[in-house]
Image (cartoon, rainbow, N blue to C red):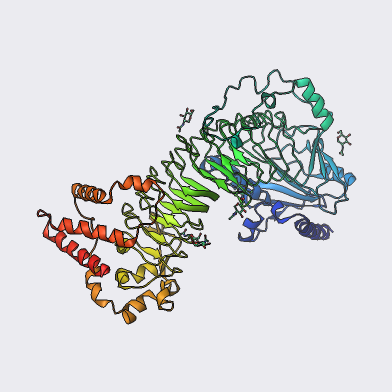
Amino acid sequence: MQLIALIITLLLLAHAKAQLQLDSDAELLPGSDVEADSQPEPIAEQDRSNCPSSCSCQYAAYNELPIARWINHMTSSDNDADSTLEDTDFLMLSKIKLATCLLQDEHETQELFNALPLDLQALILLHGGNAESQLTMNTSSLRGLNQLMTLEIRGNGITTLIIDEPLEFLQHANFEALRLQASDRLKRPKYSKLPSDDYEYKPPRDVAANEVTPKYELQFESDDVVEIMSYEQHVERLKQTRMPSFYGWSRLEVLRIHSCNFNELHWQMFDGLTQLHHLSLERNGIEELQPFAFSGAPHLRSLSLAHNAVARLYYLGLAGLLELETLNLSDNRLERLSESSFPPLPHLLKADLRQNPIMYILPATFWVMNDTRELQLGSELAALELRSWNSYGQFDSLHKLRTLRLGNVSTASLEQGVFKGLHAVEQLTLRGNILSVQFDAFAGMEQLRELDMSHCGITELSMDAFMGAKQLQLLNLSHNNLTHVPNGLLDEQTQLEMVQLQNNQLTTLPTSFFLQPRLRVARLDQNPWQCSCDMSNWKPRMTNTIRLPSVRSCVRDLNGQEILCRHVVGYETDKNLVPRCANHNGRSVYYVLRKQLHCGATRIFGHSKGSSTRGLPHWRKIELQQQQQRQQQKPKQKRKQHKKPRKSHGSQRNSLHFVLSHQKEPQQKQQQQQQHEASLSQEMSNEI
Ligand SMILES: *[C@@H]1O[C@H](CO)[C@@H](O)[C@H](O)[C@H]1NC(C)=O
Ligand SMILES: *[C@@H]1O[C@H](CO)[C@@H](O)[C@H](O)[C@H]1NC(C)=O
Ligand SMILES: *[C@@H]1O[C@H](CO)[C@@H](O)[C@H](O)[C@H]1NC(C)=O
Ligand SMILES: *[C@@H]1O[C@H](CO)[C@@H](O)[C@H](O)[C@H]1NC(C)=O
Ligand SMILES: *[C@@H]1O[C@H](CO)[C@@H](O)[C@H](O)[C@H]1NC(C)=O
Ligand SMILES: *[C@@H]1O[C@H](CO)[C@@H](O)[C@H](O)[C@H]1NC(C)=O
């Protein structure tokens, strides 16, 4: 008898789950994409005793339960997860009693709550059905379940949860597609102090006042935004609107309210949540962050407001979040950021501001984020204007930033100063419209290892564009509109391992290109190469190669314990990547050189290692540089003006000249002499 009931229950549940998945849009289910590639759900022990008929009860390791999905998802938004793991490790491994119940109508729901086993630790309530099926429930009806740590309720959009009593035992709560309301009976604390009372921070003012045109003027500087209603006014209003409050949910660590139309935030809502570490309020139609909205949860480490409608950000909205590590404001309606957008966020590590139509970032915006490691911006809706002001850049004071990703930027010319102060950035990704890159654009970015400027419409690079970025290992300039690579562009980048130049308009390359000491991959395909014997030192093993994702490889001892591990990068040959000659019917460069141009002879000279100056003592290089500079007649001034690409003819003559003058130096070692004779001959044969 019991068995039949169980089978019916399981069938019912399966049906309801399927229906819920159909009803809700895919994104409503967090981590559903994550789930797809994970293992099939483990068959948990069934608990047959004491389980109401519309529920399925299981007893399983916490991290195997469906609720662990959203908890892990939210808590892993911590950058290095180690701090969170400490707290939850024990929990994740222990066995937990979970009931998953289908809600039908109100009467049955009350009965169901009464029948649930009192030692339940986790509860999932699902209310599917069509949008007409109304259901209202009380938090007070869950009071008896005081062992409950985790509660998840998924409604159909009009399912209502009335908060009439705090659930002070809960640690994790997830509400989805519900209406949350407070009851008039809900006891609200009496406040003697407002959060604004001892808040002192004031944003810097008028940082760019002299330099900013009227279109940058602030619109919401008036002080009435700051004003907070009196306590009585507020209580009145809260009662009127049934504004929910989580006051008294004192053990709550993770709170997720998605798609609940939970759009009016007030500081009382989260007040007293001193254990709350993770708060996610996605898809609620939030338009504005009221002053001190989250200051009652001062230990928040992650906050997500993604997929809302926040159009303006005033620093008091996020005031008091001194421990925040992750801030997600992606997919909102922010159009600009300024010094009054953010309060101090001294521990913020990651900020996601993508999918906001941000066009302007005024200087001093990020002064309050001086510990941040990762920043992402960019949207399809608007292009971000990249620029600098006389003495300020847009990203000033992000001294610890490691990763910067900017999508859809717009600037006619990427100038020196735009990335000023970004000394620690290792990875920079830019997309958008950058017509030219000026000299010293990345100066000071001494840690920069990966620079991806593909799909930026770049037509011109200054010969000193990458000056100062000495650690560059990966340079991605693919899918641009480059017609020429200036001679000497990569002279300083001795660590360079991979250069991607595919899908440009290149016809020639400086001969020194393949002399990069550590170069392993050079993607040159999809360019209209004008083939000539100048290309004799091109190397098929570099151009016809892709780098594979790195693989972790370990040395193990006899017991199979890992002793030493490292990431190994693999390479693979791909003949399709071969560069082709536009002037020889699209034939492979190497074929044309060998079979049609018969360039074999010059290859003798192609063995020289190092460019014309490499291997020379430093003093000699400087001397050569000075010589070169004298010849170019005030080149710095020339460079500062908008430059035309130097004709390759001219630059070859220059390098020819200083190779010659170096030859005349008597004290050079013979070995070096030979080397440079080789390169001299090569330069000469190029010229002919
Ligand atoms: C909510 O709780 C109150 C008091 O316990 C009760 O009178 C009321 O019927 C409950 N409402 C629902 C919808 O459960
Ligand atoms: C921000 O939230 C969106 C939507 O949930 C998510 O796709 C994105 O990965 C989040 N960003 C970060 C940095 O976690
Ligand atoms: C960030 O700024 C604050 C306030 O100006 C300062 O106290 C703190 O030391 C700075 N932190 C870093 C890492 O520079
Ligand atoms: C960049 O923003 C503009 C609007 O300013 C938009 O038309 C364009 O599609 C965006 N580009 C990309 C690649 O998203
Ligand atoms: C590249 O440049 C050519 C001519 O300078 C121009 O016609 C073309 O639209 C450009 N392409 C892109 C993708 O910017
Ligand atoms: C370089 O950019 C292209 C186009 O955006 C991209 O497909 C490719 O993966 C990038 N290469 C690397 C190594 O990141």
Q: Where is residue 185 in the image (x, y as percent from the top left)?
A: 84, 28
Q: Work out whether 131 lies above or below 208.
A: below
Judge from the rendering whether residue 606 lies leftward or rightward of residue 424; answer left or right: left
Inspect this view and state whether residue 202 appears. Answer: yes
Q: Which residue lies furthest to the left in this view?
A: 666
Judge from the rendering whether residue 422 lies leftward or rightward of residue 192; answer left or right: left
Q: How many marks?
A: 0
Q: Position of residue 468 (x, y in %)?
A: 35, 46
Q: Work out whether 120 lies above or below 41.
A: above
Picture residue at 44% right of the left edge, 45% below the top: 415
Judge from the rendering whether residue 610 lies leftward or rightward of residue 327; answer left or right: left
Picture residue at 23% right of the left edge, 58% below the top: 612
Which quarter of the figure is the N terminus placed in?
bottom right
Inspect this view and state whether residue 377 appears. Answer: no
Which quarter of the figure is the C terminus placed in?
bottom left
Image-quadrant location for residue 614: bottom left
Q: Where is residue 389 in the image (x, y as percent from the top left)?
A: 48, 37
Q: Work out whether 382 lies above or below 547.
A: above
Judge from the rendering whether residue 344 lies leftward or rightward of residue 7; answer left or right: left
Q: Which residue lies furthest to the front in this view?
A: 633
- Residue closer to the observer: 352 or 63: 352
Q: Position of residue 103 (x, y in %)?
A: 83, 49
Picture residue at 71% right of the left edge, 23% below the top: 228
Q: Which residue lies furthest to the right in this view?
A: 107
- Residue closer to the observer: 473 or 106: 473
Picture residue at 50% right of the left edge, 50% below the top: 412
